[in-house]
Structures are given as structure tokens and as C-alpha cells.
Amino acid sequence: MQFIDLAAQRARIGGRIEQAVSKVLSEGRYILGPEVSEFEAKIADYLGVKHAIGCANGTDALLIPLMAWKIGPGDAVFVPSFTFAATAEVVALTGATPVFVEITHETYNIDPARLEEAIEAVKAEGKLAPKAVIPVDLFGTPADYPAIDTICHRHGLYVLSDAAQSIGGATPDGRCGSFGHVAATSFYPAKPLGCYGDGGAMFTDDDAVMEKLRSYAFHGKGESQYDNIHVGLNSRLDTIQAAVLLEKLAIFDDELASRQQVADYYRENLKDYVRVPKTPDGLVSAWAQFAIETVDRDALKAHLGEKGIPSVIYYVKPLHQQPAYAHYPKGPGEMAVTEQLPNSILCLPMHPYLQRSDQDRIIETIIAFVSARQAVAAE
């Protein structure tokens, strides 16, 4: 059993991908070939944005907008602590200061009320200038953008949406990847929409911002790569990866529907035994991960492993407790949810090709484990 089964997807569209890659190889346009602009146009149309700018990876997709906004030393950027390191890493790389903010238990996404408290506290202290917020759509569920946008507009902050896990997710106001001043995503192979290596993209409706993002991603170029108007990066989406993504995008909606079926089946059958994720009304998750919570997490993980069932702990430690980030500030108040989750959260196999028989085995193993623990506790 696979935690994420990329081989099953390749069995479905492998022939088409091989033809697409072979075309790139035969034409020899490996850098910024026609497949790159074609994919950018199609993903922009899918998300409902004016511009998609491909880049080398999801981390660069977060870093480049910060560079374009001239965010640096003396600036504060507000981020959740319960997320992958890249969200805070890019802030530190600019020389700015990541400020860690508590999340809500319902969605695992940044808590808008605690966000505003953190912004006001930084302003009151006067040592840093609040400049931006990076909400993360954790595990595929959209962050509370209406509340976040209202807060950021009131305080004059940029919103950089970290949609690395959520392309395919949606709200009544649009798809993930269309929110904020700029949105960023990763096409790492394990993502719901992933390529066969590293890749990323940025999304915006602002023509001027688009031009800056393209420049910073291509050595800060002006009229050509030999006319440098910014200090930039070498960060381009490879043509071969764009060709792969075009084929994956063609089946993406079908895969999202299958992910939703897998999530619904998990939730219905496990809800009486462990805490299962609940998607707020009106929101659609991309289901990058399916996370349960239980007080016996470590024992359950070990038991699943003995039965040949893979599981992963996302995340084993919040960023504000890790050596690289422990010296950065937190917003006021306790980080109770952020600090408790690493003790109880466990992610189960989740992908569009998970067989019902395998899912039944996962569910039955969890139920048997929890029931046995409850019986012992009741004695």
C-alpha cells in the first residue's frame, strides 16, 4: 500500500506523458519552450486569474513576491507556525522577520483574530514594520481569506497566499491560487497537482506585479537577460515539467472528485473513533492530506506500520520550537493548538487511486485499535 500512489496515476496517463516529454526532447526547447506558456495560460484560466508565472519550485514562488515587494530587514511578515519550513524560510532569507501566529483547530489554518492581535502587538512595540501575511491553505483547505483580507486592508499589508497544498480547493469567492495580492504554489510530485521533479508557480491579477515577478524569476531582467534592473534569481519552470503538468491538469478535476470520495468515506467511517477533519460549509478542500487526531497517536502509528499501512506525522514540531526559528517572535498569547497538534495528529494514505479494499483495511485497523484501547480503559 502506498501513502501517495504516483505509479497508479502514471499507469493511467503514462503514454500521454511519454509522448509529451518526447515532443520536448525532439524539439529541444528545454528552457521556456511553448509548453511553459501553454501551461501558464491553462492554469491561469483554471484558477480564474489573469497571470500565472512558472518558476523552479514552490519555495521560490514564495520568495520572489517578497523580493518584488522589497521586503527585507526591519520588516515583519506574519506566518503560521504549524506548516512546512518554506513558509517562514523565505521571510528569513529576505532578511525580514517571520512572526508566528496561532492557528484554528477547525481548519489548522491561521487564526484571523490572533493574526490581528499579532499585527497590533508588533505595531505597538515599534521595532518592526508589519508588511505582509502568508496564510497557508494547510492540507488543502482554504484559509479564511475574507477575514484575512479585511485585516490586511485595514493595516496596509500584502497578502501572499501559500497555496502549495491547495490547488483544486475552492471557496464561494474563487479557487485557491486566486486569493491575495499574489498566490504561490508548488508542483512537487506529492502535491495534488504535481510534476515529475521540482516546479512552482505564482498567480496574480496585477499586470505590473506580473512583470516584476517574471523579472525577479529571470535574473532581474529588463528588456533582455543582459539588461538587469533587479537582483533576481534563476528560477524557471522546465519545459519538460510543464509538459507533464499539462497532461496532469487534463485529468485533475476527475482526480479531485476521487479525493473527495476517499475523504468522505474516511470521515463517515472513522468519525466515532478519532477526530476527523471537517471542511467548513461552502469550502472545498483539495485533500492534499487526510489528518486524524487521537491521544494514542504514536501507538496507532506503530500498529498501522505493523499491518503494512503507511502513515505520516505532519508536522512533528511547530516552527517556533525548531532551532532555526526559535529566536523569532510569536504573536501574543499561548500557541495551544499549534503546540498540541504534533502530539496527536496523523495523516493517512490519501490519493485518487486508493482502492476501497485498501481503505476498508485502514479503517478496520484503526477501529479495532481504538476499540481495544477503549475496552482496556473501561475495565
Image (cartoon, rainbow, N blue to C red):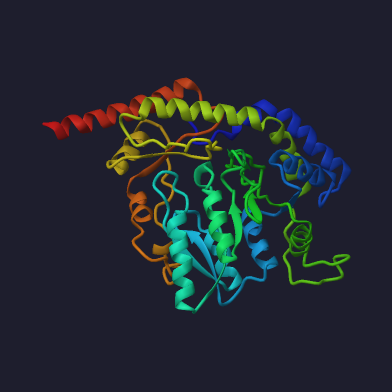
- Is 306 situated left or right of 238 in this image? left
- Is 32 situated left or right of 104 in this image? right
For the view shown, which residue lies furthest in the bottom direction? Answer: 127
The residue under the point 38% across, 66% down is 332
Q: Position of residue 312 (x, y in %)?
A: 43, 43
For the view shown, which residue lies furthest in the left direction? Answer: 379
Q: Position of residue 303 (x, y in %)?
A: 32, 35
The residue under the point 51% across, 26% down is 261
User: Which quadrant, please, contains the C terminus?
Assistant: top left
The residue under the point 84% across, 38% down is 23
Q: Quadrant of residue 34?
A: top right
**Can see residue 328?**
no
Q: Quadrant of residue 129?
A: bottom right
* Depth check, front residue: 142 or 359: 142
**Can see residue 255?**
yes
Q: Position of residue 235 (x, y in %)?
A: 72, 59
